[in-house]
Amino acid sequence: MKDNNQDGPPRTTPIQSATFSNPINAEIRRAAATGIYDIRGGGAKRKLPHFDDLLFLGASMSRYPLEGYREKCDTSVTLGTRFAKNPIHLDIPVTIAGMSFGALSGPAKEALGRGATLAGTSTTTGDGGMTQEERGHSNKLVYQYLPSRYGMNPNDLRKADAIEVVVGQGAKPGGGGMLLGQKISDRVAEMRNLPKGIDQRSACRHPDWTGPDDLEIKILELREITGWKVPIYIKVGGARPYFDTTLAVKAGADVVVLDGMQGGTAATQDVFIEHVGQPILACIREAVRALQDLDMHREVQLIVSGGVRTGADVAKCMALGADAVAIGTAALIALGDNDPRWEDEYQKLGTTAGAYDDWHEGQDPAGITTQDPELMARFDPIEGGRRLNNYLKVMTLEAQTIARACGKNHLHNLEPEDLCALTMEAAAMAKIPLAGTDWYPGKPGTSY
Amino acid sequence: MQTFDLEAEGLRALNETLHAQADNTNQTKWEIVNPRGSHAIAVGLDAPIEVNVKGSTGYYCAGMNQQATVNVHGSAGPGVAENMMSGTVVIEGDASQYAGATGHGGTLVIKGNASSRCGISMKGIDIVVHGNIGHMSAFMAQSGNLVVCGDAGDALGDSIYEARLFVRGSVKSLGADCIEKEMRPEHLEILTELLERGDCDAKPEEFKRYGSARTLYNFNIDNAY
Ligand SMILES: Cc1cc2nc3c(=O)[nH]c(=O)nc-3n(C[C@H](O)[C@H](O)[C@H](O)COP(=O)(O)O)c2cc1C
């Protein structure tokens, strides 16, 4: 092939290395200039095997569909039936994941509470404790019990409708939290008993227990303090889902929350987000298998998260055996995070709508992941709540549409047999037959 | 004085009974017999009552205490008075790991020794230990005071924030960002009061003070550009 160098001898076209790609080289230069790793919010950005790699089969000669808008397709779920006197009843199986006050503004937390309440679901506190706004506007509020114990106190514990002991998060299994000084306003500092303006690290390990045997006793203490009334969840990152689920059940969990590597975070090292943990697709069946082996499937409920975006994702989680899902990033987007209407300002921050992830810097143009009073004032919690409710409604309708097409009168009746996989990877991870075959890699009794 | 036999009546009944005591209760003095190392004894109390545990306790005795005074006439297992908000907890014997962990307020007195991670992540609690403390004590300690009349183990005050540490004996090693600090008159005053509260006759002048060098407060970034 002739090169386009018209004058001299033919030359090779410059080739960009796939290994030393532009983004990698830029990161090497950035590291060399600053001496600190990249910290950011959000979840894994790399392409991963995900729910898009699964499809529903729908009804056929052997399965009757339900009538689209007419026939009942229940979406309710009850969480915490194992030990709690007062399990949580939700109208829809989409819950709002724990996101800290500090990472999010007070009005953003309020909007999450408003939207979740309108939609008949629960919302969750986060690292940094419970705010008035949030408790006041959330009909069902899950109180996180985290290693940092920032803002942790028994009065708030008793106000909670459930307690979530956070062992790990999908974005950073084995890692703690981080809140940089820019976001430590007076209010945040006071709630966390720390000086204003310093970079806060949240511990990665609980200060007063190690291992599942200790956790069992910790849970006994929490139940004694709250009179055995509210469910206790255990949240784990997607690391070793079979064993983590088994041990969580052994430790006395009412509910296991499993967060895959796509799960968002307020802030952590990019290297952690992109290189530690397993995609949620690979975790769900293993967690369900653990529950089944213990005869606890549906007795201890399973909530899964990490990149849940649509009603189709919800339906796929249900079909793989989850009882409910949790959303973080998607809820923020529904509130207005990364909205192109702020494109000019994203550009000024050196980014673009959809890619903005420096939530820890507190300069969020949308006024959601900030403690800056001026930016916060841009965000209307009532409008935010309305938008979140709408989005949750659409997700639910979408999931119902799929369930009816599969002939199911409850989302929980969706099953693995309703699915096929588009790729070998997804087939192996989700233990779902590859489309057009009755086989997936690792299927018992087969050899390939 | 009300007596409660833990072995006969069980943990749930114990905590339920103690939780039922309101601010104006006249049943202000309780004695718990046969604790036999049970976990979660007298947790989540929130009334100005006095609870005397006649024996040793398991994990998390007096956890999240508010207002109450809890005396353990024996030794305490891990996490005694964890996340205490107010009130007083006194251990006549020794305390296991994580004593006073994440405590926000109140006073914890340990008449014997405390094991590792004493005062870990403390957030305002005052802890007075008559004996020694183990390694990694006051890790990430945010605020409050830790007084040690004996010696401290390895890595004292690692990643400490604003808590004050007073140690009379030796310190095996200091953790990252923890340094010895000058004992000024205001600190002697604080210490005198703490020793008094902790029923301890050690002399304030014999103590050294340790705290944060504050070099880990912000990420160290090379701002040459
Ligand atoms: C801004 C933000 C803050 C978060 N804060 C917490 C937290 O305080 N505690 C926690 O357990 N998880 C936290 N998470 C993780 C979420 O609870 C959840 O696991 C995750 O967002 C789910 O994945 P998704 O974002 O893809 O929906 C946070 C996530 C985001 C996006």
Image (cartoon, helix red, strand yellow):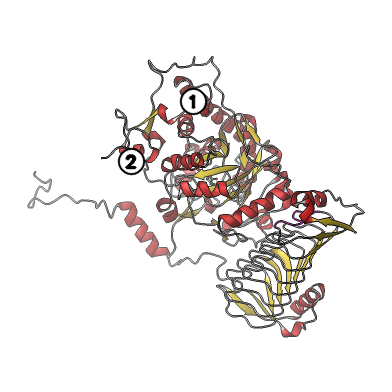
Residue B149 higher or lower than A336, as above or below: below
Disc 1 marks which amino acid?
Glu
Crowd tier of the residue under label 2, counting other residues whose Cα lies within 10 Å: few below 14, some 14–19, many 20 or above: few
Mark closest to the chain's N terminus, 1 or 2 = 1
User: For mark 1, what is the residue?
Assistant: A398
Q: Which mark is residue A442?
A: 2
Which chain contains the residue that carries disc 2? A
| Label 1 CB sits under 8 Å from any ligand 1 atom | no
Q: Nearer the viewer, residue A280 or B193?
A: A280
- Please check the rendered image and state whether residue B45 is part of the magenta-colored stretch, yes or no: yes
Front: mark 1 or 2 = 2
Q: Nearer the viewer, residue A312 or A133?
A: A312
Say if mark 1 contacts mark 2, CB within 8 Å: no
Q: Main secondary structure of the magenta part?
A: loop
Residue B200: where, in percent of width, then height? 79, 78
Instruction: Tell me which corner region of the image, top left, top right, bottom left or bottom right, holds residue B55.
Output: bottom right
Q: Is mark 2 on a helix, strand or loop?
A: loop
Q: Measuring 61% from the left and 69% from the top, which residue is drawn there?
A: B160
Residue A43: where, in percent of width, then height? 46, 46
Residue A163 higher or lower than A396, as above or below: below
